[in-house]
Image (tube, rainbow, N blue to C red):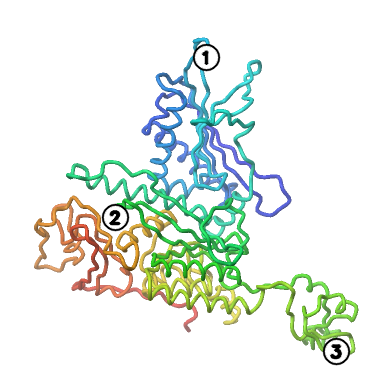
Amino acid sequence: RNVQIYVGTEKTAKRNAAQVVFVRGVTHTPGLVTFSGARRALLQGLDELERAQSNSKVTLQSSSRIYLHSLPELTGATPEEIANNFYDVVDKLKSRLAQRLLKLRVDEIEAKVRVTSTDEDGNPMVVPVRLVASSMEGEWLKSAAYIERPDPVTGVTREFCVIGAGKDAVCMLDPYSTSNIIQTKRAIARRVGSTYAYDFLGLLEVGLIQEWENYLSDLAGAPGAPSIIPGGLFESQELLEGPDGNLVLGKREIGTNKVGMVAWLVKMKTPEYPEGREVVFIANDVTVQSGSFGVPEDELFFKASKYAREHKLPRVYIACNSGARIGLVDDLKPKFNIKFIDEASPSKGFEYLYLTDEVYKSLPEGSVNVRQVPEGWAITDIIGTDEGIGVENLQGSGKIAGETSRAYDEIFTLSYVTGRSVGIGAYLVRLGQRIIQMKQGPMLLTGYGALNKLLGREVYTSQDQLGGPQVMFPNGCTHEVVDDDQQGVSSILRWLSFVPKTTESPPAVRQCADPVNRDVEWRPTPTPYDPRLMLSGTADAAGFFDKGSWKEYLSGWGKSTVIGRGRLGGIPMGAIAVETRLVERIVPADPADP
């Protein structure tokens, strides 16, 4: 066969060693550099990858890499033209296949083609060109192209030289990076059912391309309609704390953050604002101490949210966390002793924990509060020497909860729950009011294990029974449920399309092909009918709103009322309709009820 699959596991003594699934293929079919040929080849690779991942040897946090070697020689194009065409093809493939690429955890796509050319003397020669879309450096599936320079004797490639204006002198011995910190972080995020925080920037760009493609498709042939996607579609700058503690715009190497909270000022050119609009995105980095909220995280969240309020910009919070951080003084664990009530029967309990006089004097001053006892010093309070492991985190939680409430009053706030959101993380998304929830993203105040201990028996078996979509969607907390992070990002962008660029700006209007003076063709029937059809229309009869613009929210709650948003002549509007048909409501049973 032309395709082979390998599974590699990093040699390390650590738990959850990095695993990579390699798909390697050879093709004799020409046209790999065209969109249709590249799409066909990539779909074949994804099919093989999907079958491979059904094997029990492949873990859920594995990375996937696809390689295809095209044997036919390409004529009539230079390596530079091949590279530029590859960049366009990759952008289109990412926008159309993003959900499947995410599901299969594809971190690298690579193709090798052979281009006919001539040397300095005019003699024919074949130039091997390697085309790579890789996430290894942080940015999701970033494109690059190299010319291979083989050894004239052995034929083995000696160096890879970057294709591009003024870059041909930049050569490297090996374009492949080994498993690095970014790959480790991606594996951690996948383990909790989410996406690495910095990868959401790539998903936003892909979602924006999809939005433009749909928009241009709807406007095809309309007078004065744009025909191409504008350049510079997506830009992001990270909000970083400066030396004085204030936020400044900048960039840093991905994966170097020490704080489990990141924020960006994102500028996007959308169909409503082709000149660009700004949005503040705040996200938990679940790879830093499980995404828990400590004092540094609270401060960054507070300042980024305040920045959005001061500039009157929409604020989007991507939640994947484990609640407020309650730390332990690990250095003290092996040093204390226990004074049991009965040494022969420890099950009767203990009187106190104590330190010997020697150990107590070796500890930093103020790290513990003690009282003297015959054995030494009994511990009354453990303070520790590190900031951010105690109740100060709860104080910060109150601070950002108040900031979120203020932000909801002053600007547009939207939250997306991915992976999980616990404790203060669940409070924040609820205080922001508008919530998009992924199917694998429960919102809860405490875990099911703690509740089982409190109840004294095994009542709950998963977090979803407490705060999964089947609970939060019917009770009105969650406005919309999505299947994966790419769909979640697309829902964020669609919701933002109804929102002005600032609180002081006029409504976000977009050009539409649906004439304003047309008739509302859909008509109610004598028999019970769906009121949504009056707003959205059908394939045969136009409804009240512009074709394809209607979007319903809170469809799982208050089913006798229909609410949503749409556009009329390109102007965003809200709508409320009454459901006159008989409705059915399902209330999930609480396993804790007697």
Which amino acid does the dot numbered 1 rest on?
Answer: Asp
Mark nearest the camera among 1 and 3 is 1
Can residue 53 be seen here? The reply is: yes
Determine contact: label 1, label 2, CB under 8 Å.
no
Q: Position of residue 273 (x, y in %)?
A: 31, 54
Instruction: Say which label, 3 or 2, has the lower sequence index.
Output: 2
* Tag 2: amino acid: Glu
Q: Gap in Å between the C-alphas at discs 1 and 3?
A: 88 Å
- Going 37% across and 33% down the picture, which residue do you hit? 35
Dot 1, crowdedness within 10 Å: few (<14), some or many (≥20)? few
* Residue indicated by mark 1: 119
User: Is label 1 in contact with label 3 (beta carbons under 8 Å)?
Assistant: no
Residue type, numbered disc 3: Gln
Instruction: Look at mark 2 in the image and give the residue it sits on.
Output: 272
Q: Pinpoint residue 473: horizontal percent, then vertical percent.
A: 38, 70
Q: In the structure shown, which secondary structural element does the residue marked by tag 2 occupy?
A: loop
Query: Rounded to the nearest whole Å, what is the CA distance between mark 3 and mark 2?
Result: 71 Å
Graded by Cα atoms within 10 Å as few (under 14), some (14 to 19) or many (20 or more), the crowding at tag 3 reads: few
